[in-house]
Image (tube, rainbow, N blue to C red):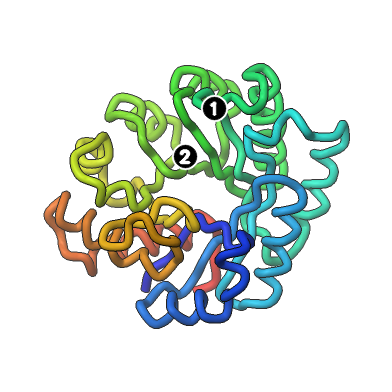
Amino acid sequence: MLIDTHAHLYYPDLKSQLDDVIFRASEVGVEQIICVGTDLDSSKKSIAIAEKYPTVFATVGVHPHDAKDVSADFIEELRKLAAHEKVVAIGEMGLDFFRNLSPPDVQSVVFRQQLELANELDIPAVIHNRDADEALLAILKEVTPKRGVVHCFSSGVETARSILDLGVIISFTGTVTFGKNHNESVLKAIDLEDFMLETDCPFLAPIPNRGKLNEPANIPHIAQQIAEIIGVSVEEVAEKTTRTAQQFFRLPR
């Protein structure tokens, strides 16, 4: 059994064939999928998808790109959405200083507010980080999530260890298949219990499907590459990352 812990199934290219996407995932052993919201609208779409498919669960949150657009009562809106029985986390939240589509100070405020909400509700925080290691760590030290994951991890070993020292875990995408990068050194430096698997679909399809539409059925390619990097069986990668994801999101077994 495998779990895709970060997917955006409401994107049109996936949503238009969602029955097939869910079926293809189940055919290769991907039995649970977390559909991640990035603003109020996509959060509602994630819930609707989770309502339709028993194997899909939802998160609700505001991505740093969209932080500039939040209303004064957005936290109350997220709190209401998070009450749904299929919602398992707050996010995707965080910092993106690469594209800076929202001012950094606004990103930081909206990030803190969502971390506080996740802690209040005792559910995980799903965190985005791009080119913002120092600022991200500073905020996580101020408002440390009870359960948190920095998704699509792309930073170095030192940042990974600093995050893990806070009790926050990380997750890896298809970028692990793209050749030598930070992922390889990080994977060799941490424990198998410290991370989860994700596609971040429809983005970042792994080799051998790089450049194509990504989907949850590609999780086995990611698991296989990680197994080869750290020198264990793919079965062990599947077993331990699945157990971590089930405990982290409190998923049914």
- Which residue sits at x=46%, y=44%? 151
* Relative side of 25 to 79, left or right: left
**Residue 190 in the image: x percent, y percent?**
25, 40
Q: Distance from label 1 to label 2 (Cα)?
A: 18 Å
* Relative side of 208 to 24, left or right: left
Residue 69's place in the image compared with 132, above or below, is below
**Residue 203 in the image: x percent, y percent?**
46, 52
- Image quadrant in which you'd find residue 18: bottom right
Q: How many other residues sit within 10 Å of disc 2, few (<14), some (14-19) or many (≥20)?
A: many
Residue 6's place in the image compared with 118, above or below, is below
- Which residue sits at x=25%, y=37%? 186
Question: Which amino acid, by three-letter code, is at mark 2?
Answer: Val
The reply to whether callout 1 and callout 2 are in contact (CB within 8 Å) is no
**Residue 134 in the image: x percent, y percent?**
46, 18
Residue 229's place in the image compared with 120, above or below, is below
- Image quadrant in which you'd find residue 243: bottom left
Read off the residue under disc 2.
Answer: 150
Residue 220's place in the image compared with 141, above or below, is below
Tell which of 209 and 120 is nearer to you.
Answer: 209
Question: In the image, which disc is placed on residue 193?
Answer: none
**Residue 198 in the image: x percent, y percent?**
42, 55
Identify the residue at the far front of this view.
211
Q: Earlier in the sequence, mark 1 or mark 2?
A: 1
Question: In the image, which disc is placed on residue 99?
Answer: 1
SS assignment at label 2: strand
